Image: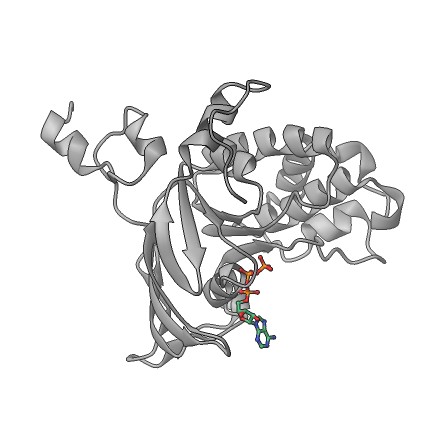
Amino acid sequence: MLKSTKEKRAGIDPMNIFARNKNVSAPVKSLLSVNIFKKLPAFPMQIELSVQNEVLVVVGPSGAGKTTLLQCLSGLQKPHQGEIVLNGRVLFSSTARVNLPPRHRNVGYVFQDYALFPHMTVEQNAAYGMKGNRRKSLKLQEVLEMLQIAHLAHRYPGQISGGERQRTALARALLADPELLLLDEPLSALDYETRYKIRKELKSLQRHWGIPFILVTHDLEEAAFLGDRVMRMEKGRVVGWGIPDDIMYRHANPGGRCPSPYPQ
Ligand SMILES: Nc1ncnc2c1ncn2[C@@H]1O[C@H](COP(=O)(O)OP(=O)(O)OP(=O)(O)O)[C@@H](O)[C@H]1O
């Protein structure tokens, strides 16, 4: 059924330049809702946010709390107060005294250094954490092929490139059938060409998998490319949505001269 213009407008965050520029339909039910408070040594972190079936990119200066946010969502750190709900399941609630351990959250986490087991092959690393089911080997094969690492199945992490290690880490995260995937600067260790290639793959992967991705990056062009929405954090708070117009200009005009350089 067609949505009215009013309904369509209701689905657009006016601060979100990406949504503003797209034909966005009315909002679907929020998959992840977060409202947490955590005291950090330098400042208190307070985040309220909801994420749908989309790529949410988190940007912000070093020490802003981006990794802490991901770790609170994955269960590696505990907020002092608040609530985290994923697809109706309470992962954390200070009032209900719920704090599910990481293995019960069904949240995938791809770390900056990929954290692969060096003594396991690509295939063993990817299958680690897969839930036992009859289609296990079929699915493993399918994902390795989708990420173009099937031919490396029997190699060890020390025998493959950075981009291939990155894909192995992604395969491992996806094969655990997560309901939410967290990616902490997943492309930062890669060369420009591989980064460019994998960021395209990441975007289509999210569409194919149909779960929310939350990705932290320092690269604003990467944020512009990957993000359905871009959230900016500073000192533990959300200070804005979207990214500066000149970055958007560069994104839309690769190689073009930017009228006003972004002061960073
Ligand atoms: N293990 C720790 N012990 C004490 N303070 C910490 C610890 N880890 C992080 N912090 C502090 O918490 C705050 C948020 O750190 P966090 O790593 O989440 O920032 P970030 O935005 O991910 O930074 P970066 O972009 O540099 O990775 C910072 O002030 C940091 O100094």
Position of 71 with respect to 159 (left or right) is left
Image: 2 above or below 245: above
Location of the N terminus by quadrant is top left
Image: 21 above or below 78: above
Q: Is residue 188 visible?
A: yes
Position of 194 with respect to 33 (left or right) is right
Toward the viewer: 233 or 25? 233
Q: Who's the residue at 48% across and 21% down the image?
A: 252
Q: Who's the residue at 36% across and 32% down the image?
A: 18
Location of the C terminus by quadrant is top right
Quarter of the rendering containing residue 170: top right
Instruction: Name the quadrant where ligand 1 sits.
Output: bottom right
Q: Residue 190: percent from the left, percent from the top? A: 73, 40
Q: Residue 54: percent from the left, percent from the top? A: 40, 40
Total count of labels: 0
Q: Residue 41: percent from the left, percent from the top? A: 51, 79
Q: Residue 211: percent from the left, percent from the top? A: 44, 43
Residue positioned most to the right: 159
